[in-house]
Amino acid sequence: MSLSRRSFLVSASATSLVTATGLAAPSYSRAAQRPVFTHGVQSGDVNTSSGMIWTRVDRPSRINMEISTVESFKNSIKLPPMNALPDTDFAAKRLIENLPSDQDIFYRFSAADLSDINTVSEPIVGRFRTAPASRRNIRFAWSGDTAGQGWGIDEVGMKTYATMARHEPDFFLHSGDTIYADGAMQDEVDLKDGSKWINKVLIDEKRKVAETLDEFRGQWKYNLMDEHVRALNAVCPTFFQWDDHEVLNNWSDSKDLTDDDRYTEKSVHVLAANAARAFHELTPISYTPAEPGRVYRKIAYGPLVDVFFLDMRSYRAANSENMQDAPSDATAFMGQQQIAWLKRELANSKATWKIIAADMPIGLVVRDGDTRFEAIANADDGAAKGREFEIADLLRYIKNAGITNTVWLTADVHYTAAHYYNPARAQFQDFEPFWEFVSGPLHAGTFGPNALDGTFGPEVKFVAAPTEEQGANLPPSMGLQFFGLVDIDGATEQLTVRLMNRDDEELWNITLDPVRSA
């Protein structure tokens, strides 16, 4: 690659704004003579021939864009300009298409003030590499949970992002809880040892729960104030999915906020609409013209891997005791339309490995109060019931359709683990064995471990979580922040998973051989 990672890290650092508060302000200032790029650049949803690029400015501007296959931008291609306006919070993103496969793509933005188009910003640059059309080694990272439980940007910053960047992944899969819109922060937090956690960077939008569109936007802009996040974004595409905290804790369409005094806006539908708009404005997630707000999708990353992003939020029924004896509207989790899409896309996939990116785990027990359940498992250990019907149906389909080499990646529970699902140990047995790997948090409180439900026969092969003595909600400074690395060998097609911590220590690994189709 002609552009070093160090060059891009320096470039990303150069885009830092003068003050923290100014970064997240939805208004703009004329104090700077020229437009300013406020939150760096991002790319995402890259495949063999296209990718999304994103940036944001501090005022109404015409965004000039160009792309090149070389760092010098010699013989670059200029794209039609876009306007960054208040209705998108001055953010602009574009799908760039007809790109060569397995190629470094450099992109450059400049901004002209709409009130004076001769007043032009300094340029800002980023890069990504398109997916290969033939077999080569592939590496990607995954994790979840950013800026949660009151742990914000301290003097060290979101270190896990810097650690991931050192591994030079082809892409980073963010498994959800990308923001904590319901997690108000304070300037200081008292720690058990008598010291203090200091949120060195804090903005008004993070001092309360998000309700308005601008407050949800501020949640996203806060994360982008971290230098490590911006540096990774400049050199590595992020593939985003969401979970509950993008709206509020344990969110579903039927969430009741009547007794939650933190919220003056009591309609979860209004909150979800504001959250979804901010999510799509401020990330480089791709869009489907027929369903522009859809989160579930497939990214084909060459012949070795397809990634299937699930949405376990938008279509679920209310949390319940999760013990229904038959499938119904009350047991919906992903919903019939999404399940039908997933089955169809898995059956059509020609990739060696099918990565199912789930924002919640299958067998871990995640509760919502004393009697309701937030995830799939119901702690019953028996035959499939409630939300487990969807998983049973899907696993049976995968087996009967002869779909091989599925691997589930997830986050949500704020610790890291490896689970092997074995029908010989299960109550529901009509499926082929598979692995589920859990990671996170990236920069949030550490919890766990959770109990496992035996319906689908999971076995813990590895876990790293707080000890009983350490307790729960450990700050990032304790070091129990986790991410995973997946390497796929272009020659052997073997897939290796490594579970890592933020200090870049390898905690556990396994190499999986692909099953060859007949």
Image: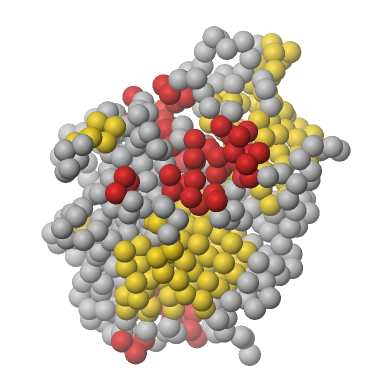
* 136 left or right of 387 in image: right
Residue 430, compared with residue 127, is above or below; it is: below
Give above or below for 369 relative to 117: below
Q: How many labels does the image show?
A: 0
- Chosen colour scheme: secondary structure
Residue situated in front as seen by the camera: 209 or 110? 110
Q: In which quarter of the image is residue 115?
A: top right
**Which residue is at the far right?**
75
Q: Quadrant of the C terminus?
A: bottom right
- Closer to us: 451 or 455: 451
Residue lying at the far left of the rendered structure? 370
* Residue displayed at 63% across by 72% down: 489
Left or right for 430, reference 489: left
| Image position, residue 515 (x, y; %) | 57, 84
Can see residue 114? no
Rendering coords of residue 214 (x, y %)? 41, 28
Compared with 512, 106 (above or below) is above
- Expressed as whole percent of the image width and height from the top left, the position of residue 268 reads 30, 41
Query: Residue 284's quadrant in the figure?
Result: top right
Residue located at (42% from left, 42% from top):
158
Viewer-nearest residue: 92 or 23? 23
User: In the rendered image of this protein, does residue 157 appear above or below residue 89?
Assistant: below
Residue for point 23% across, 81% down: 382
* Residue for point 62% across, 41% down: 6
In the rendering, at what x and y percent does residue 21 appear? 41, 21
Residue 33 visible somewhere in the drawing: yes
